[in-house]
Image (cartoon, rainbow, N blue to C red):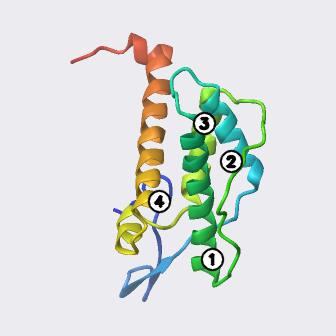
Amino acid sequence: MSRNWPYRLNLFILKGGKGWADTATPVFMSVILLGRKNYDVLFSTLNGSNAYQYEKENLAKFVRDLYSLNTMSYNVRYGEEMPIPKEYEPNYEPPVQEIQLYKLLQCILYQIELTPEQLEKDNKSELAESLRFAEAMLQRLASGIIYKLPTYQKAAWGL
């Protein structure tokens, strides 16, 4: 299973006769370069959160790393040379609710095709750390959202 699961499903076109595969050819999803507003909303929401408390400069670095990873993925995918953000000075955007934060972070991670292992191999361990942190944050958000669902609260703990 790829690192991007469940964010990206690996799809295959099957070649061969009558629907059975002789070989599988991977079909890759596209990578879009997300607009800066996505990162500003992420920053503003996390900066105002009681659940996630960061020093502003560490939070800005984390968000810049995700922005950089999206740009790097775009460049690798399309052979482009879009400039990688070196600095990130956040603009305030209204914070979003937890479910929108989850979907925003999921969207950002979906646009990053690099893995922590690839980044470490390329001596980019700080970027790998930010990517792992974002993936863990996504899981934590999902758990928090599920925990608050009335159906979860009513479900039996064991069977």
Q: Secondary structure at mark 4?
A: helix
Q: Nearer the viewer, residue 134 or 6?
A: 134
How many numbered markers are drawn?
Answer: 4
What residue is drawn where x is 68% and y is 81%? 81
- Judge whether residue 4 can be spotted in this image: no
Where residue 91 sits, quadrant-wise, is top right
The answer to which of marks 2 and 4 sits earlier in the sequence is 2
Q: Is residue 64 left or right of residue 82?
A: left
Name the residue carrying label 4. 127
Mark 2 touches mark 3? (CB < 8 Å): no
Crowd band around label 2 with a 10 angstrom C-alpha radius: few (<14), some (14–19), many (20+) = many
Q: CA distance from mark 2 to mark 3?
A: 14 Å
- Judge whether residue 13 can be spotted in this image: yes
Name the residue carrying label 1. 75
Q: Quadrant of the N terminus?
A: bottom left
The answer to which of marks 3 and 1 sits earlier in the sequence is 3
Q: Nearer the viewer, residue 20 or 40?
A: 40
Q: Is residue 136 left or right of residue 108?
A: left
Q: Is residue 21 left or right of residue 53?
A: left
What residue is drawn where x is 68% and y is 53%? 88
Q: Is residue 141 above or below residue 151?
A: below
Q: Nearer the viewer, residue 73 or 129?
A: 129
Name the residue carrying label 3. 56
Give the amino acid type for the residue marked by disc 4 in the picture. Answer: Leu
Q: Residue furthest top?
A: 154
Mark 2 touches mark 4? (CB < 8 Å): no
The answer to which of marks 2 and 3 sits earlier in the sequence is 2
Q: Secondary structure at mark 1?
A: helix
Q: Is residue 68 above or below residue 99?
A: below
Which disc, if any, is residue 39?
2
Give the amino acid type for the residue marked by disc 1 in the picture. Answer: Asn
